[in-house]
Image: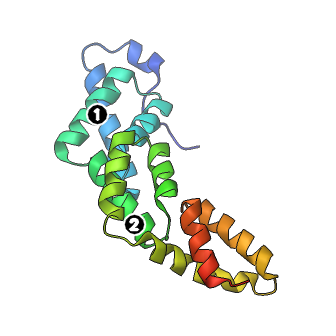
Amino acid sequence: MKSRVFPSNDTLAGRNGSEGRDWVSKGVDRALRLLEKRPRTKHEIRMKLFNAGCPQDAIVRVLERLEQLGYIDDVRFARDWAQERAELKGLGKRRVRFELLSKGIASELADQAIYDVFSTIDEDDMARRVAERRLPCYRDLDPVTKRRRLVLYLARRGFDFSTAERVVQELVPL
């Protein structure tokens, strides 16, 4: 069985003076290991440390230290995440916003990142490319069913209904 990164509360009870520093240094170590895998939000790091049993005051100090060092930056994370999800995954504004909020990004930061990224992207063109890639999956269906399924697919990918319907009407004539 894998040993815990943080000592238990029972172990800490007998220590005097150094317990706070211990938690902080171990918290920073754990957070850096998490950040080696992929960038994370402040909220994600907070939850990982909390679930590992780290006290709240130590979590606050760990997060402050990581921000000072530039290892966590929610503004940069939001912008990079939105850019990647839009360009590489072909996701629309609504889906990208939902993902950012689920990662603990503040609503204002998510909206700003989406504005920054999607102001340079033609969302109709992106929806058209996504729909064209999906269209062969529906080749054996009648046009009405094909349209309905393609609109729903684009909606699940985060495109608004009017964009999805407009693009599908162009691609699938009745």
Secondary structure type for disc 2:
helix
Locate residue 151, reporting x and y percent.
66, 68
Q: Is residue 160 above or below residue 2?
A: below
Neighbour tally class for label 2: few under 14, some 14-19, many 20 plus, Cα within 10 Å: some
Give the amino acid at mark 1.
Answer: Val
Q: Residue at x 29, y 21 (%)?
A: 20
Q: Total label count? A: 2
Q: Is residue 72 among what the camera can see?
A: no
In the displayed structure, does residue 103 sit left or right of residue 28?
right
Q: Nearer the viewer, mark 2 or mark 1?
A: 2
Which quarter of the image is occupied by the C terminus?
bottom right
Q: Which residue is mark 1?
A: 62
**Residue that protrudes farthest toward the left in the picture:** 68
Which quarter of the image is occupied by the N terminus?
top right
Give the amino acid at mark 2.
Answer: Glu
* Label drawn at residue 84: 2
**Foreground pick, 52 / 102:** 102
Q: CA distance from mark 2 to mark 1?
A: 28 Å
Locate residue 125, reporting x and y percent.
46, 77
Secondary structure type for disc 1:
helix
